[in-house]
Amino acid sequence: MEHKEKTAYDPKETERELYERWEESGFFNPDHLPGKRKEPYIVYMPLPNVTGTLHMGHALDNTLQDIVIRYNRLKGKKTLWFPGTDHAGIATQYVVEKELKKKGISRFEMGRESFIEKVWEWKNQYGDIIYNQLKKLGISADWSRVRFTMDPGYAEEVKKVFIHYYEKSLVYRDKRVVNWCPRCGTSLSELELEYENRKTKLWYIRYPIEGEKNYYITVATTRPETMLGDTAVAVNPKDKRYKDIVGKKVILPITNRTIPVIADEFVDKEFGTGAVKVTPAHDLNDFEIGKRHHLPLIPVINERGKIEEAFEYKGMKSEDARIKIIERLKSEGYWEKEEDYENHVSTCYRCGHVIEPIPSMQWFLNMDGLAKKAIDAVRSKDVIITPKKFEKMYIDWLSHIHDWTISRQIWWGHQLPVWFCGGKNNGESFVVAVEKPQTCPICKECNMEQSTDVLDTWFSSAIWPFAGLSRDDLKKYYPGNTLITARDILNLWVARMIFSGLEFMNRVPFRNVFIHGTILTKEGRRMSKSLGTGIDPLIYIDQYGADATRFGIVWQATGQDIKWDESALSAGKKFANKIWNASRFVLGQIQDMTFQKEMNTRPQTSADKKIIKQLEKTKKDIEKDIESFKFSKALRGFYDFFWHDFCDVYLEISKEQMKSEENEKETKNILFFVLLESLKILHPFMPFITEAIYQKLPEKEKEYLMIETW
RNA sequence: GCGCGCGUAGCUCAGUUGGUUAGAGCGUUCGGUUUACACCCGAAAGGUCCUUGGUUCAAAUCCAAGCGCGCGCACCA
């Protein structure tokens, strides 16, 4: 038992100390790297949200990035891995609100200023936890350049970007039906919605035709309560059944308003009765129909998801009003029938509340030209997305894009650099400027007030590759090389970085985008904090060590989504131990030797020749695999080589060879050489143990394995 | 509904352009105190490669249909 403990590798001893030494060395910073390194290699870290702690998805994401960074550092590149965290507007506001709710406080009671203070407190607390987690994993990011998306300098850049778009007339303000989350009290872009299939009913309602007795048109709807805001009934122009009704008027039950029957291509003859109630205020499509036919907009549901004051159902939740309205339609004879129906409702991607489309004054970014730029960048291979299948997802979204709703009505975020005149024109006149104008250029007398809206979080993270770097840095470190992330933010973030880079820097921000799989639970469910299925990587690092954790992650990261399997970590731990012990053996043989960068001997025996050949092949394969983002394959290749070819075969043969005077020296040379090469090859994957062994190699003319020559 | 991906050992997964006895990790069984390592070594068991049909001298691999799972997209009220 005692014997066992002595020979097993203990990661805890080495990891903390080594990480401190690496940080002190300054080599995470490209400006401090030794030697003549000309070619830069830059990776932009996908910004973790400051909403809490990291889970295994982040561990995967960052391990892969660390592999390419460490690999390219060994390859002699000037490597910069640019780290930071995202203020994550809605997400962070939501978690802080939840915390407050536990104490029975709402943000409205607190007021905007003290609430934002509270969020900053949260950020300061959790931001550090995140960095600590990443460091424990062995991440070699340049912490001297770390940025938060609400740092003052970053905020300035965000304003400039907004103003730039505004001056090009790409940013505009308009009242439109937008996706609105009544719980969060804000608009959302379509990428921030999730869809859920729900069982509901399709209600058939009769709208009497004006001036004709017992003659009506039946519409089918899933949302009877919005009928209060109907301003037309629409049918397909080719629908013969309704040919004679088009142009007539119908009487809207309950309200007794008269509304026209119109013909619009949008309507599907086959669905329901082929006649649709048109509620421009509460449906994105109806809004479009309304625009085409100049229909009025009658809001029924307010920003809190309740019925507007103007109606007798005022203040009721829309679901409750629905029941009342159906009852009334039934009692007044307008109800025809109902059918079971499954439709998808959109929900808020943060809080899960059902989205209400409501008309609202918002700011938009015209996407026509920007989307085209982003599409061209990928079509022309300026940006290469791996695996290729994600190109389609990217191009599809950009090809059918709507203008981007960039304003949000939450409190945590970048306030728009928009200043409203309090004087004439009911506060509808504004100027756009970085600083608040001293005197109002509109009325010359009022104290201008900044817009209370904040920008979509993704508006600020879209400029991450250049907004967080100094002017000097931008000359040296833009554009970057590689972006590694998960598919869920390909459009939300990656696409937007690409057009932002083109718009502001005239160059795409990176050449390669690699999309890795998503980590799922063993049962195949999504790993997420809110589901309680997320796992903190520190738990594994503590139990298996950082290297074994990284090994286990990469071992499983074959490209498909990963059903998390902890046994891969114990394989990693065993492998670390194997390396440790094989190295102890080799170190024992080469103690009196001097450090050799090159192999200073020629292979003698057939075993010598074989192991050198296998080493060369392994190294070549791994280069190819890392450069094509096949990380798991690379690691498995090395695993087989080291464990089987080197340990099982060559190490055993070497014991015999070293007994013969003729071969002793050459064998030791080869052991030394193969070990050193192995350490280099493995270092990107398992940085701590390889560095620890490297530090034990004889001779003092060496610094860190981290900056060795590949 | 359309599109994409997946279905291979008990579990989690590899399997490049079709080519001998289909592999790995973990687990299981048997045997080992070999002086780097029991977190090890040696050996073994375990597979209708989802189903059916087709192409081929040859199919886990190519084609078609079906079943199951996952994801993306979608204005069907």
Image (cartoon, coloured by chain):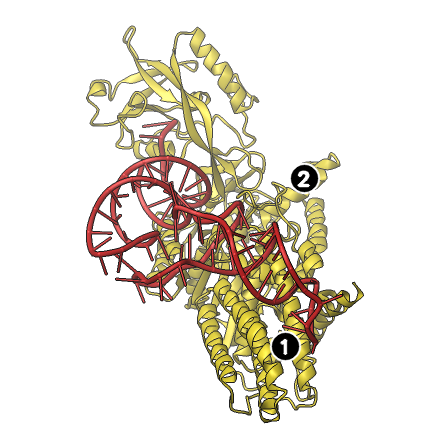
Residue pointed to by mark 2: A98
Give the residue displayed 49% in from the left and 44% down from the top: A192
Crowd class of label 1 (few under 14; some 14 to 19; many from 20; radius 10 Å): many
Residue lying farthest right?
A: A2
Q: Which amino acid, by three-letter code, is at mark 2? A: Lys
Labels 2 & 1 near each other (Cβ < 8 A):
no
Q: Quick one: A701 or B8, which is closer to the camera? A: B8
In this figure, which residue is indicated by the disc labeled 1?
A27
Point 26% across, 18% down: residue? A248
Sequence order check, earlier mark of 2 and 1: 1
As drawn, the chain in yellow is A
Chain with red colouring: B
Given the image, on which type of amino acid does mark 1 rest?
Phe
Instruction: Looking at the picture, tell me which residue is in the foreground, A693 or A81.
Output: A693
Q: Image height check: is A10 above or below B14?
A: below
Q: Secondary structure at mark 2?
A: helix
Local SS, label 1: loop
| Badge 1: chain ID | A
